[in-house]
Image: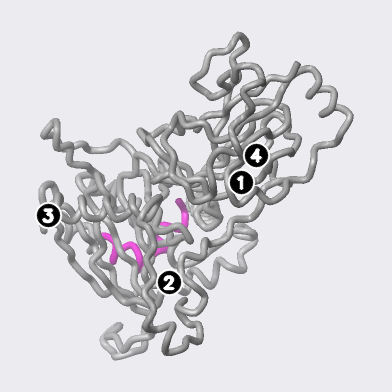
């Protein structure tokens, strides 16, 4: 006899209590296998794929794409049992089809009572429900930015007068809501101070161009950001008071034992700041590989909550957007954030003569509760010294 099993939205950790259903990969009637990807959800911190805890047939889908539901809410039901198992064995897994526009009705009352197959359930043989990116890459659909604005009013699109006058409202939720809350809390909790310094990084740029053709660096992404990142890590180890956090409940300053370097990344879902754990222990090639992996994962929308936890200092590359400088807001819980501006050919006094040099602006924002102006200035001048002579400071790390 068939049994109807419900799957509830599991707790994905990090204290999160709700998530939005962004994509269904199965529809009513589909035959699914254990660990087959059912749907993608978006929490306030990341996008997560949910695998099926059982093998069976999809009986009902209880929530629509776009719905935000609490942890513990039933989201899908399966028909399982001996007869279903025999059907599954005799039929190849069906190709996932488009989920219905509206939720399917609840299971018929004539079916047996629905056992709970969620992660917090305790059936006779407990089923472990995994979360996170699916390893079944061949079944994963590439993420695309969700179209929150009509085509007519997207930046760069040709628009009519009527379209320009139209009003579009988009609910604030998911990553965008979390970013907004974090930025407000940071701006009005930590007293921000920002200092700027123009730096001649001609030698860094020469080194970047040289390493791009070096056999040791084949396959690695070599760019100015890599050297600024390594310079920030080195400066943080030489000035450990900048690699710190303010613990308000305990009224303590926490000096971190390692540098977990955050890299701010713009994604279709909003700003995320994943970090490279123990970046101070990495060689320069290892750091290059870590940054490439971090950026690739972020752009695909696969950054996990763990990737964004426990950062100690952050770097944001506003120069990639053609911006010279700015006043970056601290990543909550961190003492400092460095903005790396655009590199531009600039008239500069070098060796007593005016020459065209490659110059950038570095802007360091810091929490004035635990970082004073002297320390902030020392870190900026340390960064300038490193980037002015990168071969001596960074190349052999």
Badge 3 crowding class, 10 Å Cα cut-off, few under 14, some 14 to 19, many 20 or more, is some
Give how far across and how far down residue 160 sits, in percent. 46, 88
Compared to 295, does 128 lie above or below? Answer: above
First along the sequence among labels 2 and 1: 1
Compared to 382, does 27 lie above or below? Answer: above
Judged by depth in the image, the label closer to the viewer, 3 or 1, is 1
- 285 left or right of 229? right
Judged by depth in the image, the label closer to the viewer, 4 or 2, is 4
- 109 left or right of 364? right
Q: CA distance from mark 3 to mark 4?
A: 45 Å
Compared to 4, does 218 lie above or below? Answer: below
Residue 357: in magenta span: no
Residue 40 in sight in this render: yes
Question: What residue does disc 2 label?
Answer: 320
Coloured how? one colour
Secondary structure, mark 1, is strand
Question: What residue does disc 3 label?
Answer: 191
Secondary structure, mark 2, is helix
Q: Residue at (69%, 40%) from the top-left corner?
A: 28
Say which quarter of the image contains residue 116: top right
Question: What residue does disc 1 label?
Answer: 24
| 2 and 3 marks in contact (CB < 8 Å) | no
Badge 1 crowding class, 10 Å Cα cut-off, few under 14, some 14 to 19, many 20 or more, is many
Q: CA distance from mark 4 to mark 2?
A: 35 Å
Badge 4 crowding class, 10 Å Cα cut-off, few under 14, some 14 to 19, many 20 or more, is many
Give how far across and how far down residue 343 sits, in percent. 38, 77
Q: Main secondary structure of the magenta part?
A: helix
Q: Residue at (61%, 40%) from the top-left corner?
A: 104
| 3 and 4 marks in contact (CB < 8 Å) | no
Compared to 29, does 342 lie above or below? Answer: below
The magenta-colored residue range is 382-397
């Amino acid at each position: 006899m068939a049994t109807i099993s419900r799957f509830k939205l599991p707790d994905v950790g990090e204290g999160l209590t709700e998530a939005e259903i962004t994509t269904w990969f199965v529809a009513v009637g589909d035959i699914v296998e254990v660990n087959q990807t059912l749907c993608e959800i978006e929490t306030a911190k990341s996008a997560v794929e949910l695998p099926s805890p059982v093998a069976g047939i999809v009986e009902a889908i209880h929530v629509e794409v776009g719905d935000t539901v609490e942890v513990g809410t039933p989201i899908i039901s399966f028909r399982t049992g001996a007869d279903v198992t025999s059907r599954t064995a005799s039929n190849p897994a069906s190709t996932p089809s488009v989920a219905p526009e509206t939720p399917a009705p609840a299971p018929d009352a004539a079916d047996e009572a629905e056992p709970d197959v969620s992660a917090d359930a305790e059936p006779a043989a407990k089923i472990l429900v995994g979360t996170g990116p699916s390893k079944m890459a061949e079944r994963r659909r590439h993420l695309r930015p969700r179209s929150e604005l009509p085509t007519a009013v997207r930046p760069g699109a040709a628009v009519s007068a009527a379209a320009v006058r139209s009003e579009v409202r988009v609910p604030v939720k998911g990553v965008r809501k979390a970013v907004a809350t974090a930025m407000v809390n940071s701006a009005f909790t930590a007293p921000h101070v920002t200092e700027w310094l123009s730096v001649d990084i001609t030698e860094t740029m020469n080194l970047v161009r040289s390493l791009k053709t070096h056999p040791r660096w084949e396959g690695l992404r070599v760019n100015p950001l890599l050297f600024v990142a390594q310079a920030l890590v080195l400066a943080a180890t030489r000035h450990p008071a900048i690699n710190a956090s303010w613990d308000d409940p305990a009224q303590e300053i926490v000096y971190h034992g390692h540098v977990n370097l955050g890299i701010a990344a713009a994604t279709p879902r909003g700003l995320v700041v994943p970090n490279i754990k123990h970046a101070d222990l990495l060689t320069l090639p290892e750091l290059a590989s870590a940054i490439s992996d971090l950026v690739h994962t972020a752009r695909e929308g696969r950054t996990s909550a763990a990737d964004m936890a426990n950062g100690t200092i952050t770097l944001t590359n506003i120069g990639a957007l053609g911006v010279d400088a700015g006043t970056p807001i601290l990543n909550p819980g961190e003492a400092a954030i460095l903005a790396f501006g655009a590199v531009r050919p600039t008239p500069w006094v070098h060796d007593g003569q005016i020459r065209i040099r490659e110059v950038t602006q570095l802007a360091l924002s810091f929490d004035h509760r635990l970082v004073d102006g002297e320390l902030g200035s020392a870190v900026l001048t340390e960064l300038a010294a490193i980037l002015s002579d990168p071969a001596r400071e960074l190349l052999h790390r």
